[in-house]
Structures are given as structure tokens and as C-alpha cells.
Image (cartoon, rainbow, N blue to C red):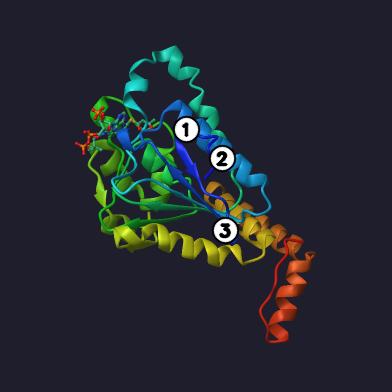
Amino acid sequence: MNSSYDMLCVQPSSDGVQVIQLNRPEALNALTTQLLDELASALSVAQSDSDVNVVVLTGSKKAFAAGADIKEMAERDLVGILNDPRQQSWQRISQFSKPLIAAVNGYCLGGGCELAMHADVLIAGRDAKFGQPEINLGIMPGAGGTQRLVHAVGKSLAMQMVLSGQPISAEQAQQAGLISEITQPELTLHRAIEIATDIAKKSPLAVRLAKESILKGMDTDLATGLRFERHAFTVLAGTQDRNEGIAAFLEKRKAHFTGR
Ligand code: CAA
């Protein structure tokens, strides 16, 4: 475990997978400025660590994260919010270009749900609750909740969640497309690592460009998205991993990808 973080447990990578656990259980992993800054830093270390191909982000049994830290937020006025250093952390988190898998148990609310939606794959324990309860505090989501949630669950459910503040269950989240799998709560992290380990064996270049292509497509019109996809596909034609993948198939053996 890496001791340079107060509010995270960062495990050493194994088989290309690194687990980062939010570790502020006394406040249900409420996201303080420090926690978000530590997370952004841990992801930026993982970004440049060639032993890390995929990161799994998780919380505790009771909460992935119960939102922005309300006590800290109470101390900020309009100018404080305008100059909020957390904005930079969110930016850095969103720039992580390796696959990020969220393993969610318990409360996943407000900024916690917004953080989970930064992940490329979300899976959750049967007991998980996803919500944007900011409206109950007289505010609204401010870290992507009104934007990413619409992509994830569609307009009607996003409106219902954001305007009423009522959370949805893991089952509803899966039906709506916010999460891809439901697990027994005690198996969520194990299953996330299993998915991550599988992805970590693929060509890192292909994985990176495929992720970028999907995210680009969510952000733009179809023609631009298709053009980006075609360019990315073409770039991969020049990689050793592509030669290795095709040769391995033809020679009926397992491919060994090197990221070149
Ligand atoms: N900020 C700060 N502290 C929090 C917190 C939060 N978001 N959520 C929980 N905590 C703290 C509680 O204050 C409590 O601490 P104390 O023991 O020192 O009082 C501790 O965590 C345990 O919480 P509860 O006793 O409330 O636990 P519970 O099981 O009774 O209830 C809960 C759990 C329903 C999640 C409840 O804690 C809750 O409603 N939390 C707030 C959820 C919320 O409104 N999130 C949105 C925040 S705003 C936001 O996220 C904006 C943004 O991103 C831009």
C-alpha cells in the first residue's frame, strides 16, 4: 500500500491492474478538496506507470462516496466556489486515458455518482444506491451530473433523479444503462478486478484508442465520431500489436501484446 496518501489506499499493480480505494469511511468517503486532489494525483501516477494498464476505483462497503463534503462546501461563498480548486482535480480525473472501472457498493450520491460516471465501466453491488440529491440542499449537480447522467440513463430518468433528488437502486441503474453488471456486494471488487485483468491483457494502444473513440463519439456528431474512429483504426494498422494479434490468430496461439 502507498502511504503518501491520507485519504486513499493505492495498491501496487498486479497483472496490469491497480486498485485505488477511497478511504474516508468516517464520512462515507465524502469528497473533500484533499481527497479529490489525492485521487487526481494517484491517477496521474497510474497514467505514467507502464505497469498499470487498468485502474479499478472503489470505496467501502457502506459507500462508494456520499458526495462532495458538505461541511467543506458550507465554508465556500460564491467567489470560493468560482475559484474552487476541486475543478482542476475533476479536470485531471477526466483526462485519465487508461480504462477506469468503478466498483460501487452502498451510497453513490452527488459528487460520488459524478465521480463513478467518470469510469468507463461501472459495476455495483446489489445494495448500491445512485443519486443526485443536491436539490435537497438547494443546489444542483456541479461536476457533470446534469450532463453525464443524461448520456447514462436518458433524459427522463436523469430529470427525475436530479429534480427530485431520489436515488435509484442498482437494478434500476442497470436497466437504465448506468451500470453494466450487478454483483453480490462482497464480490463487487473481485468482479471489477476480473474485468480489469481481462482488459489489461489486450493491446494497450488498441484499448486506449477504442476508449478515446467511444468518448469522442459521445461528445460529437456521428460524422465526426466516425471520422475519428477511422483515423484511430488506421493508426493501429501501424502497430506491432496489430501484427502480433493477427499472427497469433492465424498461428492458433495466444497473442502477447507489448504496447508497441
Ligand atoms: N459531506 C460531509 N459529510 C458527510 C456526507 C457529505 N456528503 N455524507 C455523509 N457524511 C458524514 C455525516 O455527516 C456523518 O458524520 P458524523 O458522524 O460526523 O455526523 C457520517 O458521514 C455518516 O453519515 P450519516 O450519519 O448521515 O449516515 P446515514 O447512514 O444515516 O446516512 C446518507 C447516509 C443518506 C448518505 C447521508 O449521510 C446523506 O444524506 N449524506 C449526504 C448526501 C448528499 O447530499 N450528497 C450530495 C452532496 S453535494 C454534492 O455532491 C455537490 C457536487 O458534487 C457538486
In the picture provided, is 230 more to the left or to the right than 102?
A: right
Residue 157 in the image: above or below residue 40: below
Disc number lying in front (1 or 2)? 1
Report how far apart the C-alphas of labels 2 and 3 lie in the structure.
16 Å
Q: Nearer the viewer, residue 137 or 234?
A: 137
Earlier residue among tags 2 and 3: 3
Report how far apart the C-alphas of labels 1 and 2 lie in the structure.
12 Å
Secondary element under disc 3, as helix, strand or loop, is loop
In the picture provided, is 152 more to the left or to the right than 256?
A: left
| Number of marks | 3
**Quarter of the image where ligand 1 sits:** top left
User: Residue 80's x, y, as percent?
Assistant: 44, 15
Residue 102 in the image: above or below residue 233: above
Mark 1 lies on residue: 6
Mark 2 lies on residue: 42
Secondary element under disc 1, as helix, strand or loop, is loop
* Residue pictured at 29% horizontal, 62% vertical: 184
- The answer to whether residue 251 is visible is yes
Mark 3 lies on residue: 14
Q: Nearer the viewer, residue 200 or 9?
A: 9
Secondary element under disc 2, as helix, strand or loop, is helix
| Image quarter in which the C terminus is found | bottom right
Which quadrant of the figure has residue 14?
Answer: bottom right
* Residue pictured at 41% horizontal, 40% vertical: 114
Q: Is mark 3 within 8 Å of ligand 1?
A: no
Which quadrant of the figure has residue 16?
Answer: bottom right
